[in-house]
Amino acid sequence: MTEAKPKRRIRLSLTMILSGVIVLLAAALAGVLIFLKNQPPQQRGVAPVVEIAPMEPDSAQWGKNFPNQYATFLLTQTNNTRTAFGGSDKISKLEADPRLLTLFAGYPFSKEYNEERGHMNALADVQSIARVNETTHATCYSCKSSNNPGLWDQMGMLAYDTLMFSDMTPQLDNSIGCANCHEAGTMRLIVTNPALDEALKAQGKDWRTFTRQEMRTVVCANCHVEYYFKGDEKYLVFPWANGTRIENISQYYADLKFRDWVYPYVKDYKGTTDHPEYDAIKMQHPEYEMFTADSTHYLAGVACADCHMPYTRDGAAKFSTHNVQSPLLNAETACGVCHTDVAYVTGRVSVIQNQVYDTLIAAEEALVDAIGSIQAAMGATNVDTALLDEARLLHREAQLRWDFVAAENSMGFHNPEEALRILAEATDLARQAQLKAVQATGDAGILTTGGR
């Protein structure tokens, strides 16, 4: 019995010592965690070689700190390899598809309409396009230069947009670059276009709360969106107040009674609507709207940059290539991260794009026929102006839907289901417009001769 008591005392002492050690370790761990939590955020990557000024427009300066990103970005000046339905080769869309001359008659897009080239060509291309004239505002530079963030910060977007194109030209000496998407110093992705910031706020959204993955899509919306120029100042606005789907945008423009141009067919026709001439709207490049309309990839959390700027390696360095181009030109890297059978994927893309293209052309042919029938009816005698106004409005709705897909640079692949849905509605509306024009005159001959 006498030997058992010392053993119990020893065990009790060891337990107390172990408990003390555990308490001390827990306190130390808590102290370390508190210390780490209160440390300033660490900068990503290696220490910078040079300090980049806020909104620095010269991408070469950024390239001193990020040589891989800058070297690949320079490739956008010469990456002119074509894909089946796009690429960066400067070809005339008007020559490739003469129907566009009818669809855009009376609008500058009927003068010159080319395939877009890479980011480093954006400034030079807009300065040489035949669509620019003495009445063009500086707003047309909004998505063309890395000088813009600094100018917007100094002038405000209203003053910028109020200037004429020719007035702004001497102030821009850099094409699209690093400052359009990144914050100097932190390199975080940011919204730089005031119009995008305003459009997101109109939807109750604050981009500063978005994740980095979300921002790898949102920064593309600085430029790759539908937009219009508001008022005499030609203030840049994204028509998203009602939402970003085509029906929302169409209603927005209808409520605004907005039009981009008037068809030059029958000048003395006077109808019964608020727009007595034959007017239309030109869609721009709504890649962001199409992709985010619940597309398969968007719902899966894929960002624009995942496919168009995929991660690559230079030795041990991993970085996002800035040679922004079609994923089809770099499918092993762009698609291979998620898809093991890249050949199947590219084949599937081909099937989808060909289906969308065929549907797109069917919509174009319906639109050309509708325009021809309406044109003939506008020149007819004893026309029912109310029915003809209905035909014109049906055509307007059909054309802006067709153009929403035609101007979007993926031939429908960003969102195949949505593209085909919109084109089907465009074709239906165009045929309704054609029929209304026939009914307005009672001449069935217009149905077969109009637009052919």
Image: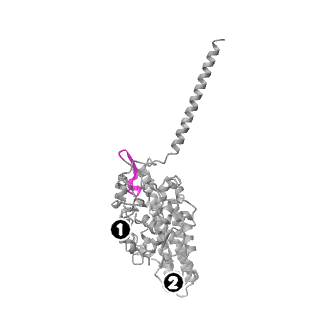
On the image, the x and y values in percent for residue 301 come to: 51, 52
On the image, the x and y values in percent for residue 18 come to: 58, 26
Q: Amino acid at mark 1?
A: Ala
Q: Where, quadrant-wise, is the N terminus in this rendering?
A: top right
* Mark carried by residue 124: 1
The residue tagged 2 is 378
Crowding at dot 2, Cα within 10 Å, few <14 / some 14-19 / many 20+, comes out as many
Sequence order check: which comes first, mark 1 or mark 2? Answer: 1
Is residue 73 in view? no
Q: Residue at x 39, y 77 (%)?
A: 133
On the image, the x and y values in percent for residue 44 come to: 43, 49
Q: Residue at x 53, y 68 (%)?
A: 239
- Residue 340 vertical position relative to residue 95 in the rendered view, above or below: above
In what element is the residue under mark 1?
helix
297 vs 36, nearest the viewer: 36
Image-based side of 89 in relation to 353, left or right: left
Is residue 292 in view? yes
In this view, the mark in front (1 or 2): 1
Q: Amino acid at mark 2?
A: Met
On the image, the x and y values in percent for residue 70 come to: 36, 55
Stretch in magenta: 314-331
In what element is the residue under mark 2?
helix
Spatial distance from mark 1 to mark 2, Cα to Cα? 41 Å
33 vs 349, nearest the viewer: 33
